[in-house]
Structures are given as structure tokens and as C-alpha cells.
Image (cartoon, rainbow, N blue to C red):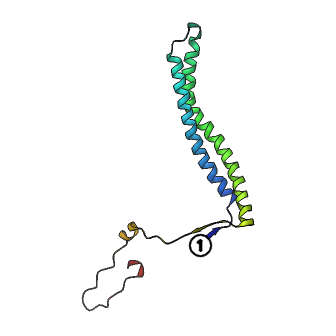
Amino acid sequence: MKYELKRVGIFSVIKISFIIGGAGGFLAGLFAGLIFAAIGSMFSSIGMPAEMGEISGLARGMGLAMVFILPFVYGFIIAIFSAIYGAIAGALYNLAARLIGGLEWEMAPVSTPIAAASAVPPPPPPAGDQPRRTPPAMYE
């Protein structure tokens, strides 16, 4: 079976782009926050001059705050930009698909061993002089 994707729904592309971008941004922010925390810890552990004593404590505190703040900030900002990009990409895909045709793919039925193993077995044959029932086709 051959299929062609003629059009995508712009709002569905925006939703998916927003969620995926937000998750990726959250992970990027977490990574950046951990780096800032490590740098802040490093600054506080090296010998600072006496007149910079407050700055070393501030660096450690800011580093720890970044672990909690940056994932949400990065996640929100990247989710917004991903949604905007998704809207533009979806609109461009629809335009290109109208002009030159959409993506084509082939599909084939797949039988999974799990589905075959979980099928309900046919009922046992009836005893005595009752007529024999044939199971529905889905049990075969």
C-alpha cells in the first residue's frame, strides 16, 4: 500500500513542536544549570581574597539557583521558538506538498508474535450430541 501525506495540520505541528521543544529546552537548561553550579562551587572553593569573600558565597548560591531556574526558563523559551518554527515548517510543507506532491511511504501489515501469543484459543469441542460450533475467524 502506498500513501502520500498531502497536508499537515498546522495546529497539531505547533502542539508537538511546543512539547518536544519544551522538553529539550528543559534538559538543556538542566545541563546548563549544573555547569553553572559546578563553576560556582569551583569559585567558592578556590582561595579568594578577603575583600571578595561575599562574592564567593554569592557564586555558589547563584550556581545552585541556576539548577532550579534555568531548566524552566530554557524550556519555556525554546518551546515558544519551536512552536513558531513548527508553524512556519508546517505551512511550508503544505505549500510544497500542494506544488510538487507530499511525502510518500509504503505500509505493509505486520504480525507481531505478542499478538499471536495473546489470542484467545478456540473453545473446546462440545461433548455429546450437540452440534459443533465453529469459532469466529479472529480465533483461528
Q: Quadrant of the C terminus?
A: bottom left
Q: What residue is shown at x 53% (from left), y 31% (from top)?
A: 34
Q: Nearer the viewer, residue 45 or 54?
A: 45
> Residue at the front extreme?
100
51 relative position to 91: left or right: left
> Residue at the top extreme?
50
Q: Position of residue 126 (x, y in %)?
A: 28, 85
Q: Position of residue 119 (x, y in %)?
A: 37, 72
Q: Nearer the viewer, residue 3 or 44?
A: 3
Instruction: Identify the residue position indicated by label 1 in the image.
Output: 2
| Pointer 1 local density, CA inside 10 Å: few below 14, some 14–19, many at least 20 | few
Q: Is residue 47 above or below residue 104?
A: above
23 relative position to 102: left or right: left
Q: What residue is shown at x 64% (from left), y 45% (from top)?
A: 79
Q: Position of residue 106 (x, y in %)?
A: 56, 69
Q: Quadrant of the N terminus?
A: bottom right
Q: How many marks?
A: 1
Q: Secondary structure at mark 1?
A: strand
Q: What residue is shown at x 55% (from left), y 36% (from top)?
A: 30
Task: Give the residue type at disc 1.
Answer: Lys
Q: Is residue 135 above or below residue 54?
A: below
The quarter of the picture where residue 124 lies is bottom left
Q: Position of residue 114 (x, y in %)?
A: 38, 66
Q: What residue is shown at x 73% (from left), y 62% (from top)?
A: 96
26 relative position to 90: left or right: left
Q: Is residue 97 above or below residue 140?
A: above
